[in-house]
Image: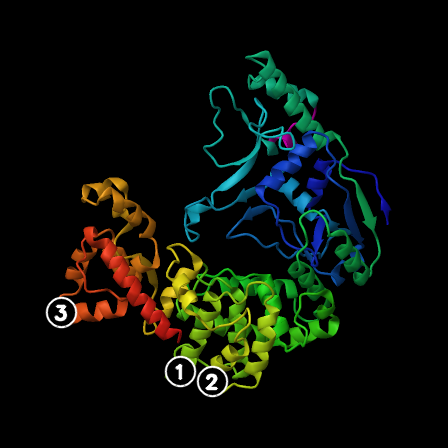
Amino acid sequence: MAFQTPITVKEAVDNVAARKYLLPAIQREVVWDTYQIRRLFDSLMRDYPIGSFLFWHVDKKDAGNYQFYEFMRDYHERDNRHNVKASVEGQDDITGILDGQQRLTSLYIGLKGSYAYKEPRKRWDNPRAFPTRRFYLNLLAPAQGEDEGGFKYDFQFLKDGETKPIDGETYWFRVSDILNLKGEVEVNNFLIDNELMKGPKERAAFANETLFRLFSAIHRKPVINYFLERDKSLDKVLNIFIRVNSGGTVLSYSDLLLSIATAQWQDLDAREEITSFVDELNSKGNGFRFDKDFVLKSCLVLSDFKDIRFKVDNFNKTNMLKIEEDWDTITQSLRLAVVLISSFGYGRDTLTANYATIPIAYYLKAKGLPDNFDVTAKYAEDRAYIRKWLIRSLVKRVFGGVPDTVLRPVRDIIGENTDRFPLELITEKFKGSTKSLAFTKDDVENLLYYRYGQGYTFSTLALMYPSLDFRHRFHIDHIHPKSKFTRARLRNQGIPETDIGFYLDTVDLLPNLQLLEGIPNQEKGDTDFGDWLKKNCASPEQAAAYKNCHMIPEVEYSLTNFREFFVRRQGIMRTRLQEVLEV
């Protein structure tokens, strides 16, 4: 392995476009964000080093022995995050990228591709929340507000409609257009044709220097310095890959272990199987946030390996082949577990510890993967115990710190007790430890101070609604509408100034929250609670049933009486939590 003659960014990007550069299956997927891409181009413009690269030469006759993927071209945070498997049939010799994938991907996206990420305050399931953005450089002014270690040049990913000149202070040059300028004369003509040499001398000089610097950085300067490895041994290449991927964007254990699994599975493609399975799990119910770490840890636990730590030694060839052999059972166990917790009302914003799902999957596997476990009547009691386990483990945050200290003993207990989910035995095992599932009066008091928008609020409310059918979608609803709780509106209602602070501090707390089905919650809107209650509970029996279910005190429900409502309901909730949690 030796240094080769450096090449330009233009040559490297052309090789990516021509699929001469591909990614070995052991490579992780794109992880750089827009800030890192902007910083890379800023470094190029300022003649800062961008590091060396490591390439792997694969002869045409050997290319079919390995799995390769194409570079990411148009990144979409929701819809296009995975690299496409490359076809090497009919290809000439291939260059695999062992070190430098993120930099080359960033260069390609900046010069030829696009980047779509979610805009704030828009829903994940809204396609318009992910507008396509292209890469631009402001030719008229440097980056603003950057400290000495920050950006000099103002690179931005912009949507259509954001690139219009503003008051002579911006001219957004689409960076991909630099590839169409073949020489210095064309660069100069572009500046003249677009009247960028007019106006204040300082601004014209900046435009001139900036565009010529970009042209030189892409077309002229051989900044891609690379080593070339020619060894055919995947074991050696894997060792090199692991060694060099300790800098830059840190290679996570899951990325590393997935790389090893990909290299060692015989019949299945570990990378494709695991990434596609993660996507499948995340699409269930109202959506989840599972990742590769979760699936890989599940593999270790469900395959009954004694040591379930994330370390390279546990991903040896013997273990990898067992995981491949057990893959169908592992995926079905996790699939059933996720369907079950979805039926409990959980999703991406409320499942605050993904690892709490693994013991459920292990139990279902040990029980023989029963059909329709989430709905069959004969498993109702079993489901109730699993639901208690899930809620308690989430609310007590037992998976904080090192999850293996919970997963190993829970697995051992489940393995010996499959008639019914052994919640009592698990609770007894951890009694008195930092992972205890038992609650004290202080714990209950702390639960009452969870707020709207916090991940644990749903679980705490769910404890107090054991009889709800969570296969219907429930929302966390403000009983007294939050829209009423502004200083101006409270004053208009005659609330004394001395009480307004209490109202604003407590409107989002648990005693003003309830679980309400989606449609009734939308219909309720900002209707005064007293009026809504009269409208939706026509008879005294209906009103009594609603109040009992939702722990509503018998008080006057006007906004002026909110303090009494809050204190009384807090007391009812405290009592119900103590009963449910056996405090």
As helix, strand or loop, the secondary structure at mark 3 comes to helix
In screen coordinates, is 21 left or right of 156? right
Residue 503: percent from left, percent from top: 28, 49
Under mark 3, the amino acid is Pro
- Which residue is at 51% across, 21% downward? 169
User: Please, is residue 557 above or below residue 55 in the view?
Assistant: below
**Residue 45 numbered tag:** none
- Which residue is at 39% across, 78% downward? 375
Q: Earlier in the sequence, mark 1 or mark 3?
A: 1
Residue 267: percent from left, percent from top: 68, 71
Which residue is disc 2 drawn over? 420
User: Please, is residue 337 above or below residue 247 in the view?
Assistant: below
When asked about the image quadrant of residue 575, the answer is: bottom left
Under mark 1, the amino acid is Glu
In screen coordinates, is 467 left or right of 422? left
Comparing marks 2 and 3, which lies closer to the viewer?
3
**Residue 381 numbered tag:** 1
As helix, strand or loop, the secondary structure at mark 1 comes to helix
Region of the chain picked out in magenta, as a range: 177-183
User: Please, is residue 383 above or below residue 59 in the view?
Assistant: below
Q: Earlier in the sequence, mark 2 or mark 3?
A: 2
As helix, strand or loop, the secondary structure at mark 2 comes to loop
Which residue is disc 3 drawn over? 540
When asked about the image quadrant of residue 202, the answer is: top right
Task: Please report contact status of discs 1 and 2: CB closer than 8 Å, yes or no.
Answer: yes
Q: Earlier in the sequence, mark 1 or mark 2?
A: 1
Q: CA distance from mark 1 to mark 3?
A: 32 Å
In screen coordinates, is 505 left or right of 75? left
